[in-house]
Amino acid sequence: MDTARILSEIAEEVRPLVGHGRVADDIPPLADVPRDRFGMVVRTVGNEVFSVGDARERFSIQSIAKVFSLTLAMRLEGDAVWDRVGREPSGTAFNSLVQLEVEHGIPRNPFINAGALVVLDAVLSHQQHGQDLVLDFVRRASANPSVGYDVSVAGAERATGHRNRALAHFLKSFGNLKNDPDRVLDAYFLLCSISMSCAELAAAFQYLATGGISSDGEEMATARQVKRVNAVMLTCGVYDEAGDYAYRVGLPAKSGVGGGVVAVMPGRFVATVWSPCLSEKGNSLAGTMALELLTTKTALSIF
Amino acid sequence: MDTARILSEIAEEVRPLVGHGRVADDIPPLADVPRDRFGMVVRTVGNEVFSVGDARERFSIQSIAKVFSLTLAMRLEGDAVWDRVGREPSGTAFNSLVQLEVEHGIPRNPFINAGALVVLDAVLSHQQHGQDLVLDFVRRASANPSVGYDVSVAGAERATGHRNRALAHFLKSFGNLKNDPDRVLDAYFLLCSISMSCAELAAAFQYLATGGISSDGEEMATARQVKRVNAVMLTCGVYDEAGDYAYRVGLPAKSGVGGGVVAVMPGRFVATVWSPCLSEKGNSLAGTMALELLTTKTALSIF
Amino acid sequence: MDTARILSEIAEEVRPLVGHGRVADDIPPLADVPRDRFGMVVRTVGNEVFSVGDARERFSIQSIAKVFSLTLAMRLEGDAVWDRVGREPSGTAFNSLVQLEVEHGIPRNPFINAGALVVLDAVLSHQQHGQDLVLDFVRRASANPSVGYDVSVAGAERATGHRNRALAHFLKSFGNLKNDPDRVLDAYFLLCSISMSCAELAAAFQYLATGGISSDGEEMATARQVKRVNAVMLTCGVYDEAGDYAYRVGLPAKSGVGGGVVAVMPGRFVATVWSPCLSEKGNSLAGTMALELLTTKTALSIF
Amino acid sequence: MDTARILSEIAEEVRPLVGHGRVADDIPPLADVPRDRFGMVVRTVGNEVFSVGDARERFSIQSIAKVFSLTLAMRLEGDAVWDRVGREPSGTAFNSLVQLEVEHGIPRNPFINAGALVVLDAVLSHQQHGQDLVLDFVRRASANPSVGYDVSVAGAERATGHRNRALAHFLKSFGNLKNDPDRVLDAYFLLCSISMSCAELAAAFQYLATGGISSDGEEMATARQVKRVNAVMLTCGVYDEAGDYAYRVGLPAKSGVGGGVVAVMPGRFVATVWSPCLSEKGNSLAGTMALELLTTKTALSIF
């Protein structure tokens, strides 16, 4: 397989889609990102890296960061994390609040916002004295101490995040936040503001393709935990498009409203892609097509 | 890997669970099935067959049959089948009817009852003069002309299936059934009544592990179709337990209320298991545990 | 109060609205009704009758008939009828099916279709040998043996009523229909097809303004039952517009998709109005305005 | 009608119910109220006052106060208030949040918590420099400057009101709060903490029975506004029990979780009742029974 050539072909074939769709304009700094960007990286478990386009430009990883906090919470709390959050797909978007109410404050899964708040609340209970466990995890996973928050993005989300604020208070009313809602929200807005490039993300998520070992040789999670994070990504990682993603792409994936997507072929590679314009469901339009082309052209998928 | 030994261990380890849970007592003939049955088969793509327990006793495959009708509909209609049915997980159980209403008669996926009725309606539009396309497909896939319906089961479901009758009329009210609701219902009750053993099922589903080729060498579906059927099974195959199944078992699977489950490891094997007592979510209790043990002991899963 | 003059004024003032809105075009014979009709009757408890416009032209009373069957069921079964149907407003339209499912087959109230099916099922359990208790009740209430069904309307609804058919089977699946669904549906389609004029309806509903006594002096219900039927009309009588009707009109009322509305001022009068074009919520557009003008001009309402 | 005797009978007949049910134990000061209290007042439009039991003991009026703020908002904003809040019953309890989401932040009616927050937000836009328009309105309506807040109750609700906090942020996310959520919440918790006796409440709500005139002769609202407030109370005033209340009591009413209820017979009287133990739906158990007995014994109801 000539991966370099395949990436070139993909970049060519998705070009007509780049710039189409909407950007996440409810968060002002994200609305200003140039719409014409497209970058993609494939990084094999043997540390070969193939890239195309804007693969070294940093963007706001947004919900992709929830994979890091989930992995960390599983390390810190083991299976106890599942007492407070489910791992089932969320069904149609409008149901999330119903479900939270019907299911008495237990979010359906760790990747919807309510679930991510609960997972982060679990991590915060282990975090003291100004340390920042999630950011530290990301830096170690990527062997890259320069990864950090974009405080202008975090600030913008803090100013406009009324719905997330509502979710946090709702969770608190059910007793499913241990920390003060404002503390959890501040950490959440920072988490989502992490800024990384496709190349950096591919390095950081190496552990999901290798059974837990980072590109630097550090054990970020056990093989059993990795298998399970991948399973949760497959069923819950791309908002309400899980079924369609599995059908078209056929890989566990996690997307963010900044236009990034990470996909994992266990035992083989991590693929990352970034293009800021989104489908109606909130996933990168060109990015999704690029991943579909990747599994089609390589004939590699988990199915 | 010593598959025979692993199956023996599994049979031993799940024994305490066998007989626990409920049987599908709303369908009288199913309520009479002995509760203590357990059988399991692993059939590799090389046609090696390993089995344990009641692997040759026939049972009512129920919803497992929906995989056959979906494959057939994809062959007959191509992607057009997705105009009439989605491929997203159904969320919480109680939502299925809401979703059908909110989404104007388009069922969420082909494995919930409403979706299976639509898929069967598509097949019936190609079926004439007493031929029975789905049963014919099953017989060819399994190279076994003796597979057939259990008319006592079909009759019992026809007598008590008020909810399925409601669904069919509801779909008709949205214009999403082309045939007469009674014709579709009759075919549906027959489809669910198909009776097969674990060994027969493993042979019949060989095509999902081989990229489309039956144990007899016949092409039952294209590689692309197989990949997609497996993806839909992973996200929608086990009722509201898709996330939990992916997390624990890590294989595409389809279950039925008769207590059977089929799981696929693409390129490697098909595993079938049967034990009639069900979890609260409607999946075989001992069967699910057996599949979880299989992927744990073999360290093989798609993740 | 010069009622005759008030009715003339009302007819004048609503004229610009007459013919605007949609007719119930899913039932073919109703779609053919001339859109320009408007008739209104006020009938006092002293049997004075004031009318304007097309007050003597018959139309399909549709859901208005559910008031007759509810009154009759309360006579036949007493408070036991409320074991099988609630008396709470239905909330937003799309919830009716959810609620039926969440509330295990107990319809929210006797005026939504599911509730009317259950009420009619209760009446049918008392009905034998070809007698027709509801039609008999209507004829006695209106002292008018010529009132009857419009079989062409009933036939059209039978042919297209897939959603009602779905509801009946759904109720049966919960055990909340005692008779065969098809028998209940046939009776339901006939019930809704009853054809009466504003003048005939005003006579028939006299008993709701008089504490139970028909225009002919017969006791159709007890004072206590009448008070309660009026209460249910106020909270549940006009589909999802109960709050708005109470706010604007301020009288218990029941509407039908044929464009008729009956309103009751207890101790004073019955008002009936007909104009076939409907608001988005399914109530006669000009009819609702006419009733609002009536309570404004007479300064009479229950509030 | 011998009202004094009727009240004595009622007090006697409801005695077995007094103390049964639950108190609103999620608000600590309310949980400490003696469970055995029962008081009732009937105040006619001619200013005759009849009372029985603990009619002069103050209690926390809670949601009853929403009638004052709604009346005031209608005075201040006219019909514009209905652009931001509906007037339809809320359906089943669990739907309130769904509806808020489905209906894009427009609460169903002004008496559910979300609606009361929006109404109060409207009032607050007219309120400056430390004045307190709602409290001022209550004092004038009741001709009683001693009416005030119970700051211990307000403080307890502020500490535990996570769900109301969630609602306020959710409304803000839809742009349906103009003021800062924390300002609206503070005013809301104070509003609900108003402390009054049955006798004081009956005086304060005199204007709803007289077409707008307070016991002191002041015009609190127009006749048209009063008619409409009464209509909204009838359809939306008693949580999810509107239909049952209309059926059993037959009067517009508003209840609070402190165990108080106000009912209005337009043109005749105001009845107030207090008994702290609640039904499952959140309305005073003995209070509801007392009102049902009142309309039964006097044969007076709006139906």
Image (cartoon, coloured by chain):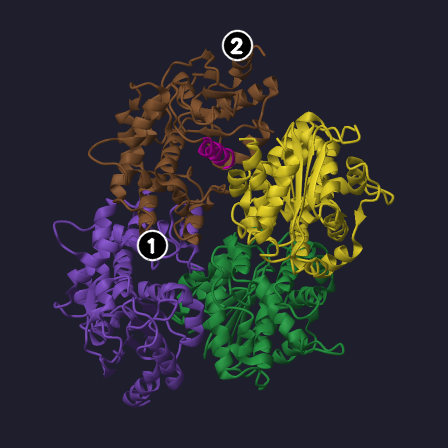
Chain colours: A yellow, B brown, C purple, D green
Q: Quadrant of the N terminus of chain A?
A: top right
Q: Is residue B87 found left or right of D58 in the rendered image?
A: left
In this rendered view, identify the residue nearer to me: B225 or A154. Answer: B225
Asked if A212 appears above or below C57 in the picture, the reply is: above
Label 1 is placed on what type of residue? Gly
**Dot 2: within a 10 Å radius of its alpha carbon, few (fewer than 14), some, or many (20 or more) residues?**
some
Query: Is D211 contained in the magenta span?
Result: no
Q: Which residue is mark 2?
A: B4
* Residue drawn at the location 16% of the way across and 60% of the way down: C151
* Residue drawn at the location 33% of the way across and 68% of the way down: C254
Q: CA distance from mark 2 to mark 1?
A: 58 Å
Mark 1 residue element: helix
Q: Is residue B87 found left or right of A210 in the rendered image?
A: left
Q: Which residue is mark 1?
A: C115
In this rendered view, identify the residue nearer to me: B302 or C42. Answer: B302
Instruction: Let me know if residue A230 appears in the view.
Output: yes
Range drawn in magenta: B223-235
| Residue B120 drawn at (x, y percent) | 33, 38
Residue at mark 2 shares a chain with residue at mark 1: no
* Quarter of the rendering containing residue C259: bottom left
Q: Is residue C220 found left or right of C81 in the rendered image?
A: left
Asked if A11 appears above or below B58 in the picture, the reply is: below
Asked if B237 appears above or below D106 in the picture, the reply is: above
Mark 2 or 1: the one toward you: 2
| Residue A46 drawn at (x, y percent) | 72, 28
What main secondary structure does the magenta stretch of the protein show? Answer: helix
| Residue B37 drawn at (x, y percent) | 43, 16
Mark 2 residue element: helix
**Dot 1: within a 10 Å radius of its alpha carbon, few (fewer than 14), some, or many (20 or more) residues?**
many
Callout 2 touching callout 1 (CB < 8 Å): no
| Chain under callout 2 | B
